[in-house]
Image: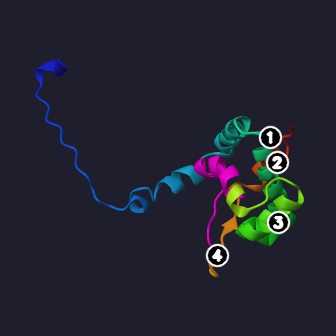
Amino acid sequence: MLSKLNWFSVTAHTMIPYTEETRYTKIFISNRSTKSQTRAVKHVLASQTSKQRQILRTLAEEMLSDEEKFSNGISLQDYTSICSENMLCYSSQQLRTLLGDFEEHNLVQFPRNPNGTIMCRIPYSREILQNEILKDSD
């Protein structure tokens, strides 16, 4: 039946900046159910090295230790220092590299605060941080 129809296809580029085209993706990600988010976190954690999981676990512990850190995140400089003390990584560049997969899967974000400082945060609920990320052990 479809072979009898004449189709005309044209690729139309919008020329809209990428950030504008994808502005609604974060809404879709944040509106996922807790069960869906939990499955996603488990899946990503299962594919990471133990060092990467430990670095993420360290961030989760820091975020849960203080209400301000939970809502705003921790500065990348402070986080690098904590990871260095725990002998996980030694520079912010190395830390960003190790967190690259987590950033791609939206498990870690690097927003800037009003002062321009790069912050590091996990955009999930306390429940997911406690039950999935901190529960995960090597």
Amino acid type for the residue under numbered disc 4: Asn
Within 10 Å of disc 1 (Cα), the crowding (few <14, some 14-19, many 20+) is: few
Task: Examine the rendered structure and indicate whether residue 36 appears above or below residue 119.
Answer: above
- Residue annotated with mark 1: 50
Amino acid type for the residue under numbered disc 1: Ser
- Residue annotated with mark 3: 81
Amino acid type for the residue under numbered disc 3: Ser
Is residue 104 rendered to the left or right of residue 59? left
* Callout 1 touching callout 2 (CB < 8 Å): yes
- The dot on residue 113 is 4
Q: How many marks?
A: 4
Residue drawn at point x = 84 percent, y = 68 percent:
66
Is residue 135 rendered to the left or right of residue 103? right
Within 10 Å of disc 2 (Cα), the crowding (few <14, some 14-19, many 20+) is: many
What residue range appears in magenta?
Answer: 95-112
- Residue annotated with mark 2: 54
As for residue 103 lying within the magenta part, the answer is yes
Say what secondary structure mark 1 lies in: helix
Tell me where residue 51 appears, x and y as whole percent.
79, 45
